[in-house]
Image (cartoon, helix red, strand yellow):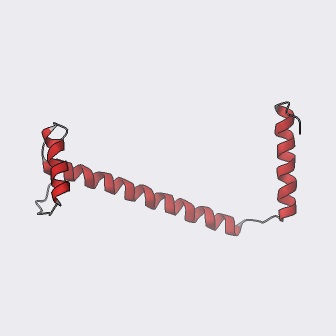
Amino acid sequence: MTVKSSISLTDQQAAFARSLVDKGRHSSVSAVVQQGLDLLQQKTEAEESDQEALRLLLRQRQEGSFISSTEMKSRLSTLLDEKRRSHDVAD
């Protein structure tokens, strides 16, 4: 289903849309605007999904356990030592 709508474009936007039609990339200025809206919708949905994933990660992190900076340094040092040994890299 389609809905007819009247929109206003700047001269630059209209010229760009018309150039896409003239090059055969779209059948009409309406098709250009439709694709632009589809892309904007996809971008918005992706951003919302990313934000929700970040909120979930933050909630999980807040509910999780914390370690001291000393413990973190120790763990990182151990990890680096293991990586150096596995790749025969000297300190």
Residue 59 vs 12, above or below: the answer is below
Q: Is residue 10 left or right of residue 91?
A: left
**Quarter that holds the C terminus:** top right
User: Picture coordinates of residue 55 (x, y %)?
Assistant: 56, 65
Residue 81 vs 72, above or below: the answer is above
**Quarter that holds the N terminus:** bottom left
Number of marks in picture? 0
Residue 79 occupies quadrant: top right
| The furthest residue to the front | 12
Q: Is residue 16 left or right of residue 81?
A: left
Residue occupying the point 62% across, 67% down: 59
User: Picture coordinates of residue 6 (x, y %)?
Assistant: 11, 63
Residue 67 occupies quadrant: bottom right
Front-most of residues 26 and 53: 26
Front-most of residues 32 and 57: 32
Residue occupying the point 20% across, 53% down: 33
Residue occupying the point 28% across, 52% down: 38
Residue 22 vs 65, above or below: the answer is above
Front-most of residues 85 and 65: 85
User: Picture coordinates of residue 11 (x, y %)?
Assistant: 15, 58
Q: Is residue 72 left or right of residue 44?
A: right
Residue 49 vs 31, above or below: the answer is below
User: Picture coordinates of residue 43 (x, y %)?
Assistant: 38, 55
Residue occupying the point 26% across, 55% down: 37
